[in-house]
Image (cartoon, rainbow, N blue to C red):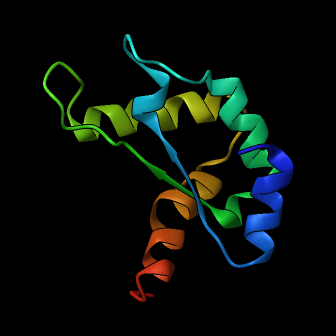
Amino acid sequence: MTIEQMKRATTMGAYLEFVYNALIGPNKVFELPEYAAAIRAVGPDHCILSSDLGQAGNPLHPDGLEAFFRGLRAQGFSAAEIDQMSKTNPASLLGLN
């Protein structure tokens, strides 16, 4: 999606998922600064972070998420923003809040 498409989707109530697996390995699709720019453009309140890991040869889920969150911190995201995207938003979407 383009940034404009992402913004449009969020106005309709969508959450955008950003997965760590797209940032690593031989099938890497994105760079972390691209993710950071997209998240900033739409706002952490509309984003969900996940690992999309579990395949042979990839990091374990907790290790992947830790690396993902560390990378986002290096891109300037606060611990509160990462918590919102990895805990609060998914819980809200699932009706667990």
- Residue sitting farthest toward the left: 56
Quadrant showing the N terminus: top right
Looking at the picture, tell me which residue is in the foreground, 79 or 63: 63
**Residue at 51% in and 71% down:** 88
**Residue at 75% in and 42% down:** 38
Looking at the picture, tell me which residue is in the foreground, 36 or 17: 17
For residue 76, side relative to residue 3 (left or right)? left
The percent coordinates of residue 13 (x first, y second) are 69, 78
Looking at the picture, tell me which residue is in the foreground, 90 or 28: 28
For residue 44, side relative to residue 11 (left or right)? left
Quadrant showing the C terminus: bottom left
The percent coordinates of residue 60 (x first, y second) are 20, 33
The percent coordinates of residue 26 (x first, y second) are 38, 10
The percent coordinates of residue 22 (x first, y second) are 47, 29
Q: Number of labelled discs?
A: 0
Q: Is residue 5 above or below residue 52?
A: below
For residue 59, side relative to residue 69 (left or right)? left
Q: Is residue 91 above or below residue 70?
A: below
- Residue sitting farthest toward the top: 26
**Residue at 37% in and 39% down:** 65
Q: Is residue 76 above or below residue 17?
A: above
Residue 73: image quadrant is top right
**Residue at 47% in and 18% down:** 28
